[in-house]
Amino acid sequence: MRSRTDIVAGANAERARSHNRQVVLGRIRSAGRIGRAEIARGSGLSIQAVSNIIADLRAEELIVESGRRAAGRGQPPVQYALRPAGGFALGVEIRPDAVFAVVLDLCGATMGAERARLPATDRATITRSVVDLCDRVLTVSETPRDRVLGAGVVMPGPFGPTGLAGSGSELLTWDDIAPADWFSAALGLPVVVENDANAAAMAERIAGVAQGLDSYAFLYFGSGLGLGSVQEGRLVAGAHGNAGEIGHIPVPAGGKMVPLESRVSRLSVQRALQAAGITVTDGEDITRAYAAGTPALMAWLDAAVEPLSAAVAIVENLFDPQTVILGGAMPNAILDHLMGSVRLTTRSVSERAGRAHPRLMRGASGRMTATLGAAALVLNQAFTPQIAV
């Protein structure tokens, strides 16, 4: 099941205009403030083409003039910047027990966030909860609805019937329809649907540690462990949207091969603590156990080092990322401990002198990263060319 509404097709004038508009918006977003000549030099577009696009974007109130920059003799060139209130993106995350929604402005700032318990996981209940929660977050944040660009909806993978069905992390009521079309009709907005790891990866690109990076990987701690891979600013999705199900890859642990997420995931740490008689209901329980030096948790952390180190090496050698990011629904204290314990092999394409970024980084978006990433997917579509021209 591929849940995107955008389709790559042959070039025509309309697609070329859309492509060039995304290029210009992307240049403005990346630079913060930039002039027309700089955009033209960096994009390969003519000054006239850039000027026309700038005029359109200003008329639509997506960008504003942002002063002038001294540039030697002559009139200093006008600088342009995104207008934060020029557009907004909705983000929705569907978990087995709850629905989360956020609104981001055009610059990626969070305008509002809401949560609702999910009493059941049938399609009607989920749809009603999503629509009601989106209405609430838009109302509470006083977001002008005519400026909402679209919505991103995130749910756990894998999508569709696969050999991984029954892993316990997926929602099984969407296999017979296209969720993007379904939620688009319910919300009255363009919708993109992704898995939680991919959305989390995009959150870091819009408003996290991956800002300014084009190729990176995100190891996402959800119920299981997922991988979001971004190459040249675009998500690596696979034929059916299931690329990155790294949690099911066999890795070494204690002298045997086991599925990665059976040793490195939120569910695995919860099971380790529960086996020691410790009830875990949320991340705060894990944080308290870590602060107390709980033996069962410390043993889990020690056992996680070998399989996580193997996973990082696999990701580095497969994707050659600028960095590998750890994040998701796991307390920062646990992520920091894991990062300090991971053994980064020298037998990796990422082992090189003069690196601009560390090989391993902690994500900045926290436990709401997939929800924020859902909205970031919408913003990324506005800023990143998605089609061949």
Image: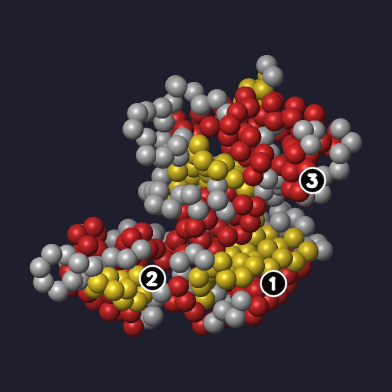
| Residue wearing tag 2 | 82
Q: Which amino acid, by three-letter code, is at mark 2?
A: Leu
Q: Are marks 2 and 1 in contact (CB under 8 Å)?
A: no
State the separation of the CA atoms marked 3 and 2. Answer: 41 Å
Residue at 41% from the left image edge and 31% from the top image edge: 350
Residue at 58% from the left image edge and 34% from the top image edge: 339
Q: Check the picture and name the quadrant holding the N terminus.
A: bottom right
Indicate the position of residue 138 as horizontal and vertical percent values.
62, 77
Residue at 61% from the left image edge and 59% from the top image edge: 371
- Assign a secondary structure to mark 1: helix
Name the disc covering residue 241, or none: none
Specify the farthest residue to the top. 255
Q: Which amino acid, by three-letter code, is at mark 3?
A: Asp
| Residue wearing tag 3 | 285
Q: Check the picture and name the quadrant holding the C terminus.
A: bottom left
Residue 63 visible to an observer of this rendering = yes
State the separation of the CA atoms marked 3 and 1. Answer: 27 Å
| Residue wearing tag 1 | 133
